Amino acid sequence: MVTSGAADPGPAAAGPRIGHYLVGGDTALVARVAEELRGETGVTVRVVSGTPARPTVLGVTMTRERAERLRAEYQDRLVVEVDQEIQHYSDE
């Protein structure tokens, strides 16, 4: 697992809105992005799929603004989307 920053973003009044995002793409690119994000304050990175050396999907806790910058920087080479809670068919 790759982690950095605080696991709990704290109360909403303490700063910008923190969200949960899935980040995926080529394993070499995803590994590089994980290392890049690791040093940022207020960002938590965990491997959702793959290994720390070759991740395919990351779970990242970060601000919406940081997610938008990541999308803009990597455009079509990296997928950055909001991590939605799964709703099971039995929940309907």
Image (spheres, helix red, strand yellow):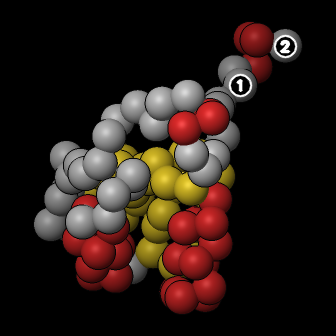
User: Considering the image in quadrants, where does the C terminus appear?
Assistant: top right
Q: Position of residue 24 (x, y in %)?
A: 47, 67
Q: Is residue 27 visible?
A: no
Cα separation, mark 2 vs mark 1, equals 8 Å
Front residue (pair 54, 33): 33
State the residue at coordinates (25%, 51%). 4
Q: Identify the residue under disc 1.
A: 87
> Tag 2: Cα neighbours inside 10 Å, few (<14), some, or many (≥20)?
few
Q: Identify the residue under disc 2.
A: 92
> Tag 1: Cα neighbours inside 10 Å, few (<14), some, or many (≥20)?
few
Residue 30: quadrant of the picture: bottom left
Q: Earlier in the sequence, mark 2 or mark 1?
A: 1
| Residue found at the far front of this picture | 14
CB atoms at circles 2 and 1 under 8 Å apart? Answer: yes
State the residue at coordinates (49%, 54%). 62
State the residue at coordinates (54%, 88%). 73
Helix, strand or loop at mark 2: loop
State the residue at coordinates (74%, 11%). 90
Front residue (pair 71, 52): 71
| Residue found at the far right of this picture | 92
Instruction: Say which amino acid is labelled 2.
Output: Glu
